[in-house]
Image (cartoon, rainbow, N blue to C red):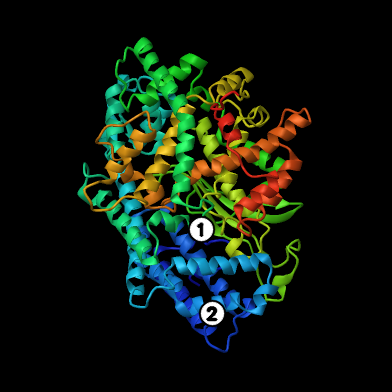
C-alpha cells in the first residue's frame, strides 16, 4: 500500500518516499470529487450524517496525507521532496479553490442551515455549518460563474508564490557562510558556539577548510555572533548578509521582492472580487478583531504606552555604549552586542552563563512536569517512525488512557526551514458509524486521538555534550508546547472545531503565550536545571538576576512587535501594489509613527517576513500582541490563586483544570471571547500584560 494512503495509525515516515506523493494525492482528490458528486445528488438529503460526514471523512484523509507532504517539505527540504511538493501544490490548491467556489455545495449547505434538522443539531454542529457558509462566501462561492476561474487562478498562484517565497529564503540563508581563519576573530563567543562552528567546518565538503570555523545565517549560529562577537566587522558582515537575504542584493532567482508585490496585488484583487475594500477586511472577517481601524487603534494605543519605555531603553543603551564601550554611534549590528554588554554590566550575568544550566533532557523533564501538574496528565516516551534520527516521539495519558501523541524535532538543520512551529498530524474526532458518533464525549471508545508536530531550530550538542538551550529557547519550547496542548487536550469530537481548528487566528496564540509565563517561575526552573558540566541546579542568586533583567529593553521589544503588526496591516489595507509608493516606503512610514530604532536603508526585512508572505499571518501579525493581552490576563488568574492561598508556586491544579476545561478542551467549538470569559469571568484587559512587561504606570 502507498504509505500516504495508510490512515490506520501514525504517519509512516519509515516508508514514505517522494514517488508516493503524486499517486496518493491524485487518488485522494479523485475520491473526494466522487464523494462530492454523490452527496450533491437529489437522492442524498441535506442532513449532517448523510451530507456533511462523508465530506469530512474524505477531507480529513486528504488533509492528513497532504499535511504529511507539507511537513516533510518544511523539515527535510531536499530537492526530491521539494519537487514532489511543488509538483502537486497546484493540483491541491486548485481542488480546494474548486471546493470553496462550488455553488451547489454552498446551496446544499445553506439548505441544511434552513432546514428543521439544523435546529435539532448541537450548538457545535450549528457553529460548524455557520462557519462553512461564511468560508464559502470568502472562497468566492457567490461570485458570478464567469469570475470563478479567475478567483481560482488567484488561489493557485498565491499558493505557488508562498512556497517559492519560503524556498528562496531557505536557499538564500543556506548560501552564505562566514569562514574564520584566525581564532582571535572569535573573541567573546561562547565555547559551545565555537565548537559548533568548528564542527560545521569539519562537515564541509572542502577538506582544505577543516582547520577553520564556519558560521551560517541559521539562528543557532547567527544569533550568538550578533550577541557576543567582539569583532565588529564580523557582526557587520553577518548582519548585512542576513538583512539582505532573498533580495535584489543577492542571486536574482532568490529575490523575494517581486514576489511580495505579486502576492499583495493578488490579495487585493481577491478582496475586490469578494466585495471587500481591502484584503485586511477579508483577513479579519473570521477573526476576533472587527476591523482594520480597530486593530490600528489597538496597536497605536499599545505603542503609545510602550514608547516612553522604549525611548528610555535606547537612551540608556546609547549612554552606556558611549561611556563604557567608546562607541559614539550604534549601528544595527552593534545593538544586540551592546545590549548584552549592558545587561551583563547591570545584572552581572550573561545569557551564555544561564544557558549552561539548561541541558535538553532537563528542560524537557521540567516542561513535562509543568504540563502534568497543571492538567492532570502524564507525558511518556513513545515510539513511532520519524523523519530524522534526532526526532523523538511522546504520548500524553490521563488516568492511564491515551489522550494524544506528539513528535519533537528540536534541532536546526540545513534542510529545515527556520523558526519554530506546531502543526497537526492528526485531529481528534469521533469515528465509526453515524450512530457511534453520538456516544458521550466522556467515552473514549471510537475516538481518534490527536497527534501533533512540535518543531524548533535549537543548537545540537557537540563534542559529546548534550544540547543546551538559552532561556529564550526554553520560552520558545514552552510556547510551541502551548499550541500543542491546545491541539492535544481537546475534548471536542467534531473535526472542524477540534483542537486548534476553527479557533480565531487572533486568539490561537493565547495558550502558547500563556505557557511562556511558567518559564519565569522559580519552582519550575529550580526543577528543570542542571549545569551541563557539574550537574548543579540553577543558583537562586542567578535566578534573581534573571528576574531583575526580565523586562530588560521590554519597551524596545514591544515596539518592534507592534511595528511588524502595523506594517503587515498597512500593506494589506492602504497600499497599492505597483504604485510609486513601495512596501519599503510603508515600512518607513510605520517606523516614523511608532519606532525608536531604524535600520539601514538597505535592510530588506520584508523579504524574509515569511509569517505574512508564506504563512497564515497576512493582515494578522497583530494577533501576537492581541493574544498576549488574553494570555497575560489568563495567567493573572493563577497569580491571584497563588496569592490567595499564600503559596509560592503558580502550578495550581484547580485553576489549571479550569483553564483546560474552558480554553484548551473546547477548541474552536465556541467563540474565543466566550471561552475567555468563561475562564476569567469577565472581558480581557491589558493591565496584566503591562504589569508583566514592566510598563505599568503607577496611579
Look at 62% across and 42% down and name the residue there: 684
Quadrant assignment for the C terminus? top right
Camera-side residue: 646 or 190? 646
Location of residue 296 in the rendering, given as x and y in whole percent from the top left corner: 44, 44
Q: How many labels does the image show?
A: 2
Disc 1 on helix, strand or loop?
Answer: loop
Where disc 2 sits, the SS reads helix
Measure the C-alpha gap from mark 1 to mark 2: 22 Å
474, above or below 256, in the image: above
Residue 378 makes an appearance in the image: no
Q: Which of marks 1 and 2 is nearer the N terminus?
A: 2
Q: Residue furthest top?
A: 323
Q: Look at 49% across and 31% down and name the residue there.
A: 305
In the displayed structure image, the side of residue 588 where residue 508 appears, left or right: right
Q: Position of residue 253 (x, y in %)?
A: 23, 51
Decide: few, some or many residues near mark 1? Use Cα within 10 Å; few <14, some 14-19, many ≥20.
some
Q: Which residue is drawn at 35% across and 58% down?
A: 82
Q: Residue 286 carries which label?
A: 1
Instruction: Name the residue beneath numbered marker 2.
Output: 108
- Residue 657 % position (x, y): 73, 46
Question: Depth check: 382 or 447 in front?
Answer: 447
Amino acid at each position: 500500500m502507498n504509505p500516504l494512503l495508510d490512515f490506520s495509525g501514525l504517519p509512516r515516515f519509515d516508508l514514505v518516499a517522494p514517488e508516493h506523493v503524486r499517486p496518493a494525492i491524485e487518488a485522494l482528490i479523485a475520491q473526494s470529487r466522487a464523494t462530492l458528486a454523490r452527496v450533491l445528488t437529489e437522492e442524498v438529503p441535506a442532513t449532517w450524517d448523510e451530507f456533511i460526514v462523508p465530506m469530512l471523512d474524505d477531507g480529513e484523509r486528504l488533509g492528513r496525507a497532504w499535511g504529511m507532504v507539507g511537513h516533510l517539505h518544511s523539515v527535510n527540504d531536499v530537492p526530491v521532496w521539494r519537487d514532489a511538493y511543488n509538483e502537486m501544490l497546484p493540483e491541491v490548491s486548485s481542488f480546494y479553490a474548486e471546493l470553496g467556489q462550488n455553488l451547489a455545495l454552498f446551496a446544499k449547505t445553506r439548505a441544511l442551515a434552513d432546514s428543521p434538522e439544523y435546529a435539532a443539531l448541537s450548538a457545535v454542529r450549528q457553529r460548524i455549518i455557520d462557519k462553512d457558509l461564511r468560508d464559502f462566501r470568502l472562497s468566492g462561492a457567490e461570485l458570478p460563474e464567469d469570475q470563478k476561474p479567475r478567483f481560482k487562478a488567484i488561489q493557485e498562484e498565491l499558493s505557488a508564490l508562498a512556497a517559492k517565497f519560503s524556498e528562496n529564503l531557505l536557499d538564500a540563508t543556506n548560501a552564505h557562510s562566514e569562514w574564520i581563519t584566525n581564532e582571535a576573530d572569535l573573541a567573546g563567543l561562547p565555547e559551545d558556539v565555537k565548537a559548533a562552528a568548528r564542527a560545521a567546518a569539519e562537515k564541509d565538503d572542502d577538506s582544505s577548510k577543516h582547520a577553520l570555523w564556519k558560521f551560517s545565517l541559521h539562528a543557532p549560529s547567527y544569533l550568538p555572533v550578533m550577541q557576543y562577537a567582539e569583532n565588529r566587522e564580523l557582526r557587520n558582515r553577518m548582519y548585512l548578509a542576513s538583512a539582505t537575504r532573498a533580495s535584489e542584493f543577492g542571486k536574482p532567482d532568490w529575490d523575494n521582492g517581486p514576489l511580495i508585490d505579486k502576492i499583495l496585488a493578488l490579495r487585493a484583487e481577491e478582496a475586490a472580487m469578494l466585495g471587500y475594500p481591502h484584503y485586511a477586511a477579508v483577513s479579519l472577517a473570521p477573526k476576533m478583531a472587527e476591523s482594520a481601524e480597530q486593530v490600528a487603534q489597538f496597536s497605536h494605543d499599545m505603542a503609545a504606552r510602550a514608547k516612553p519605555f522604549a525611548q528610555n531603553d535606547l537612551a540608556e543603551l546609547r549612554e552606556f555604549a558611549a561611556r563604557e564601550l567608546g562607541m559614539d554611534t550604534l549601528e544595527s549590528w552593534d545593538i544586540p552586542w551592546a545590549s548584552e554588554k549592558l545587561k551583563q554590566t547591570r545584572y552581572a550575568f550573561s545569557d551564555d552563563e544561564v544557558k549552561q544550566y539548561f541541558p535538553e533532557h532537563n528542560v524537557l523533564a521540567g516542561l513535562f512536569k509543568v504540563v502534568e501538574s497543571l492538567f492532570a496528565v502524564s507525558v511518556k516516551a513513545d515510539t513511532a517512525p520519524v523523519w530524522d534520527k534526532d526526532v523523538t516521539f511522546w504520548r500524553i495519558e490521563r488516568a492511564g488512557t491515551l489522550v494524544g501523541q506528539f513528535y519533537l524535532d528540536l534541532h536546526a538543520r540545513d534542510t529545515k526551514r527556520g523558526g519554530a512551529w506546531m502543526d497537526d498530524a492528526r485531529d481528534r474526532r469521533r469515528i465509526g458509524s453515524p450512530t457511534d458518533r453520538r456516544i458521550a464525549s466522556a467515552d473514549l471508545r471510537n475516538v481518534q486521538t490527536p497527534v501533533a508536530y512540535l518543531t524548533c531550530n535549537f543548537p545540537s550538542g557537540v563534542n559529546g555534550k548534550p544540547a543546551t538551550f538559552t532561556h529564550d529557547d526554553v520560552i520558545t519550547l514552552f510556547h510551541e508546547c502551548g499550541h500543542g496542548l491546545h491541539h492535544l487536550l481537546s475534548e471536542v469530537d467534531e473535526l472542524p472545531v477540534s483542537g486548534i481548528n476553527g479557533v480565531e487566528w487572533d486568539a490561537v496564540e493565547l495558550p502558547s503565550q500563556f505557557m511562556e509565563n511558567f518559564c519565569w517561575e522559580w519552582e519550575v526552573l529550580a526543577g528543570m536545571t542542571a549545569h551541563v558540566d557539574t550537574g548543579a541546579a540553577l543558583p537562586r542568586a542567578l535566578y534573581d538576576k534573571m528576574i531583575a533583567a526580565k523586562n530588560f529593553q521590554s519597551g524596545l521589544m514591544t515596539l518592534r512587535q507592534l511595528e511588524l503588526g502595523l506594517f503587515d496591516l498597512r500593506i494589506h489595507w492602504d497600499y497599492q501594489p505597483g504604485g510609486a509608493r513601495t512596501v519599503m516606503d510603508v515600512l518607513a512610514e510605520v517606523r516614523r509613527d511608532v519606532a525608536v530604532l531604524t535600520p539601514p536603508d538597505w535592510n530588506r526585512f520584508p523579504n524574509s517576513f515569511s509569517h505574512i508572505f508564506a504563512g497564515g499571518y497576512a493582515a494578522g501579525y497583530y494577533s501576537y500582541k492581541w493574544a498576549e493581552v488574553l494570555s497575560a490576563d489568563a495567567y493573572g488568574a493563577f497569580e491571584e490563586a497563588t496569592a490567595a492561598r499564600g503559596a509560592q508556586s503558580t502550578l495550581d491544579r484547580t485553576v489549571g483544570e479550569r483553564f483546560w476545561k474552558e480554553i484548551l478542551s473546547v477548541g474552536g467549538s465556541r467563540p474565543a471571547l466566550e471561552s475567555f470569559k468563561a475562564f476569567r469571568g469577565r472581558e480581557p484587559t491589558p493591565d496584566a500584560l503591562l504589569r508583566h512587561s514592566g510598563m505599568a504606570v503607577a496611579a
